[in-house]
Image (cartoon, rainbow, N blue to C red):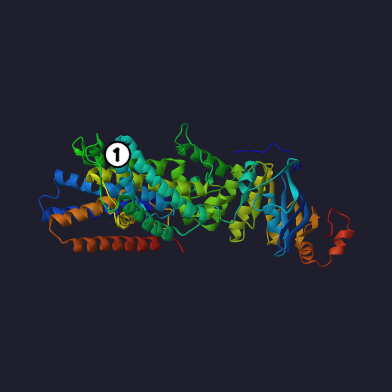
Amino acid sequence: MKTSTLERGAVVVEGLGLRRTYGSIVAVDGVDISLRAGEITAIVGDNGAGKSTLVKMLCGAVTPTSGEVRVDGERVVLRSPLAARELGIETVFQDLALAPNRDVVENLFLGRERCKRGPLFILDRPAMRRSAHEQLASLAINLPRMTGIPIGQMSGGQRQAVSVARAAFWASRAMFMDEPTAALGVRESTNVLRLARSIADRGLAVVLISHILPHVTELADRVIVMRHGKKVAELTDEISSERLVSLIVGVDAHAVVDEGNTSRLG
Amino acid sequence: MDRLLLHANEIGLGLALVAVMVIFQTKSEFFLTEDNALNVGRAVSYTGIVAAVATLVLIAGELDLTVGATLAVGGIAAAKALNIGASPIIAILAGMAAGAVIGLFNAALIVGIGVNALIATIGMTFVWRGVAFIWTDGGPVSTFGVSWFDEIGAGQVLGAPTPMWLMFVVFVLGGFVLSTTKFGSHIYAIGGSRDAARLAGLPVWRVRSAVYILSGMIAGLAGVILASSNGSGSAPVGIGVELTIIAAVILGGTALFGGRGSMIGTFLGVLFLGALANGMNLVGLAAYWQQFVTGVALVFAVTVDEIWRRRITPQ
């Protein structure tokens, strides 16, 4: 397991002037964003506000039309999620990146299998099983069976826990979660959110996109509000659902500017 | 992976195999003899070798129907090589290389361009079968008498036909690759969900291409063995054999759409179909009935599998 040596609060990943257009449509329009070690940053906004596109530019799934991404202060070009992953930036895709016919251990190591020495790439199953157990235990994730049962036969919450555990396992800088609780029940959601917190407490920058505002207010250290592709506010305190709703829909936005905190009007 | 399912499948097929053996033994005293067992072994060796690799192809969620035509092209390539003075080793490599080229074309079409595997390999079957006929002008290309080449298909090792041993080797290697290597693990993952595999960062197109090239290469090798056994490479060999091969693989519990399957299952499937054909010959059933019975066995197996799977899977 990789643990971050970053100082809490240090900026690990940042986007400067990120802009992405699709033909004549501007999905994200010049957004600056800083993700800090040990913090959970939530990104909220209405459908089409540009949240997902913004996150995808930071995790390598979409290339910016203009603007730059910096990791530890150095400019990087993320050509693919794989490139981001090599820099310790992981993304939890909604249940989609798990192989349904494989068991938990195999999914945790999917694409990054540990092999024995030699030219044949023979899997080192005992080693993978051991570190999978350690990782899941350290995140207090309980699963009925780690091997021998295809993950497709587990519940949505268990699968999401495996997704999150996998990202946490490999992330050394940042972890992005796009609507991690969308398909889950109340208890399962709580578990996933608890995981997000314990991962941030390890010193990673955690980014959460969510429509569920109570989750955001409960969990986030910092909230970025997006509207029409622009960042309209960035809050670090007095985060309440009412305030977020008014920012998301755009009423009373001037009041936020008048408060003179870090928010700006796009 | 599907441990429980695989076991149930393999056990069911094993029992069916035993049942077939008991039935034929009561009808013909020759069925359970050493000689006849070796007959079955020899008869299934070509299809067995190809079926072992077809298992990888199907688990990866791919389909290669060109293997029948590849059998012909591989055998002809080896025979042609011998006729221009090549050694048996070079001839074998020529057959495998011809198969690899066919696999490369399949990979380019299916993985590179994205043509549907069913359509692409049906089309390429015509193409390569055509090439085989054009290349040989329809006649056989003799392989007789060149050093030890005849031994590959017609020889014996430790009292058993060489092709049978070669089939065992391919199955053991295939099983090893599938269950213990990274490549095997990737084949299962990609066959289970290609999108998931891509998002997880697996080298999806590389694995898919490798599977087609491997399939061609090993089908080419089977073609060489067949040519050696026949004493010639010729264009009309292995017509329609791709369907028998896929039947054996599916019978062995491999999912047609990928993600699930095992070498042991395919091995049992091959033996089952081989024993069935052999037994029906011994008891004097007409060839028409053999086709009928094989078809019924396959449809029965997939039906039972489907019903059972639906009962144990949630939703």
Q: Quadrant of residue B161?
A: top left
Task: Identify the residue at image location x=27%, y=62%.
Answer: B295
Q: Secondary structure at mark 1?
A: helix
In the depicted structure, whether residue B297 falls above or below residue B221:
below
Q: Nearer the viewer, residue A252 or B49?
A: B49
Outermost residue, left direction? Answer: B29
Q: Which residue is mark 1?
A: B82
Q: Quadrant of residue B27?
A: bottom left
Task: Identify the residue at image location x=33%, y=53%.
Answer: B134
Mark 1: few/some/many CA within 10 Å (<14, 14-19, 20+): many
Q: Nearer the viewer, residue A109 or A217?
A: A109
List x then y, in percent, for residue B101. Answer: 42, 47
Q: Is residue B6 visible?
A: yes
Q: Is residue A147 visible?
A: no
Label tally: 1
Image quadrant where one finds the N terminus of chain A: top right
Q: Amino acid at mark 1?
A: Leu
List x then y, in percent, for residue B90. Answer: 34, 36
List x then y, in percent, for residue B308. Answer: 36, 61
List x then y, in percent, for residue B179. Answer: 40, 43
